Amino acid sequence: MNNHFNRFGEGEVVEFPSAGYARVDDVEISRSGRTARVSFDVVDANFIDSNQSRARGGRDYRVDSTPDFDRMPLFHLQVVFSTLKSRQLDGLCGYFPCELCFPYRFSNYLIPDEFLRKSRSDRYDDGSQGGDYDPSRWFKIVKSSNSAGRLATAYSGLFSKPEKVRVHLQLAAQQQRLSEIFTLPGVRQKQFETADLALFGNAECDHVVVFDVGQGSASASISGNAHAAKVAGTPEIYFDAGAGVYANQNTRPPGLSLEAGGAKAVFLSHWDTDHWAGAMLTRPGADSLLTKIWYAPDQVVGPRHVAFAKNIEANGGRLVLLSPPSSAVQEVPLAGGRVLRWAQGTGRDRNDSGLVAAIECSTPVEQSIILPGDCDYHCFKHLQAKAPVGLLVPHHGARLRSASTDVPAPHTEANDSKLVYSFGPNNKHGKARVRHPTAEAIELHSAWDHGGWRARPGFGAAGRNVRGTSEHSAVARGDVCIDWQR
């Protein structure tokens, strides 16, 4: 296993390398439009270069050997750029490279145009604006030995302490070579095939439990008593298996472990780390989720995600990468007459092109439990799920772009419909340190009774049919069970 994923190396800091190859993992533009936090998925450049040889007569490299993904030094890097708000609000590009090309200067800072295809005035996440970026582009990040470089925060592991470094950025010369190395392994399918249908046909869903994993997301269909099932390790299907990591690692409950038990599969909504990192928290000697079949969207990702996927294969698991036709919905029968309906979001970024699941039941009334990952509501209208007795709020209660009319209302015939927020206490996102859930998310879901959360989102008890896996004082936290209307 790669040391980047080692839970038992918590707190250990491995020095950021002299140079790294990186893909953009996430871009968050602030509410004001004056700053953007760009997160990079980085691999040690020297490690990659030492495994390759230069091809004759050309600029690109030939892949002569497969790098050892267990030994590969991996890093998560966050850089804050300043930019020009007026150009953002005009919907223009507004981002020009510093060390790259066509520089555009604003104060003493520059933000590279290569990070984003264009900027938008759409605002989401923690009150921020969304910036489209090209996830396939590779950069070279060079560590600076003086104060001339950009100040950045680096993590050598999911659970390690941060390191402050200064860096310079430039486009990597060997785009094709790096893309060949860092492509997700696995079997590519348009939809569930016969063997997959048989696997899910034996899976029960008497309840759905949303686990308290800190600032992340992990849920599972459960057979029998929900809380006893968790202790016994008998979730049937996991829907995401995340946990709080990096800057939000302290939001995890002590001793968190997602036990695989009799779990048949993991249905991964998308490749954000806080939706799969919980699989690395298995106690020694326990059955691991890495040995299971994982169903995930076929998305462009960086080195860390590919290394994690390789880890699934190394542990005897299997990865099925799904890319259904646009707006397609597949119905998958489960045991006991229930049905899993799933679709892919119609958006372009990782969140909004994720897989969305709705588990449905027809007795005694038509009802569903909707698990959207981080996908915004307007990107999965085609799923057309039944009225929910359970709804997991997308993106931990971040600010979304949907209208309130896009949000499913609570089931009118259910006595105990639940709207669930999965978040960690005192979570933080970027320079503003904004917390989830946001006031904008509370307002968007106003059809559900939020009680005291309308005044102070995430503090104390929420309303009659709203639950959180935590609250910001961390006094009350724990798993949330969603039951069917009986």
Image (cartoon, helix red, strand yellow):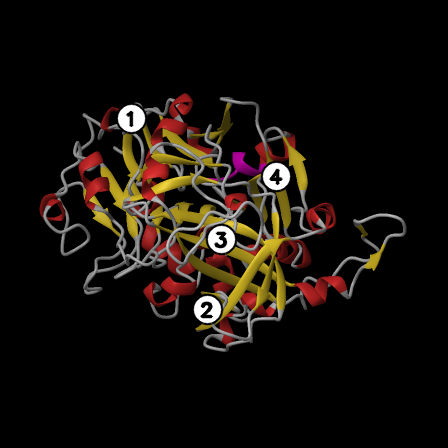
Between disc 3 and disc 2, the foreground one is 2
Work out how far the residue at label 2 is from the one at label 1, CA to CA, in angstroms.
36 Å
In the picture of the structure, the residue carrying the numbered disc 4 is 321
| Among numbered discs 3 and 1, the one appearing first in the sequence | 3
Q: What residue type is labelled 2?
A: Phe
Q: Distance between the residues labelled 3 and 4?
A: 15 Å
Residues packed near mark 4 inside 10 Å, few (<14), some (14 to 19) or many (20 plus):
many
Residue 470 appears left or right of 20:
left
Separation (CA) of disc 3 from disc 1: 27 Å
Q: Which amino acid does label 1 sit on?
A: Asp
Q: Mark 2 points at which residue?
A: 159
Q: What element carries label 4?
A: strand
Q: Position of residue 31 (x, y in %)?
A: 28, 45
* Callout in the foreground (2, 4): 2
Q: Residue at the right extreme?
A: 56
Does the residue at mark 3 contact the one at mark 2 (Cβ under 8 Å)?
no
The mark that comes first in sequence, 1 or 4, is 4
Residues shaded magenta: 199-204
Residue found 50% across the figure and 78% down from its top: 12
Look at 10% across and 44% down and name the residue there. 451
Select label 1 or label 4 by which is in front. 1
| Kind of residue at disc 4 | Leu
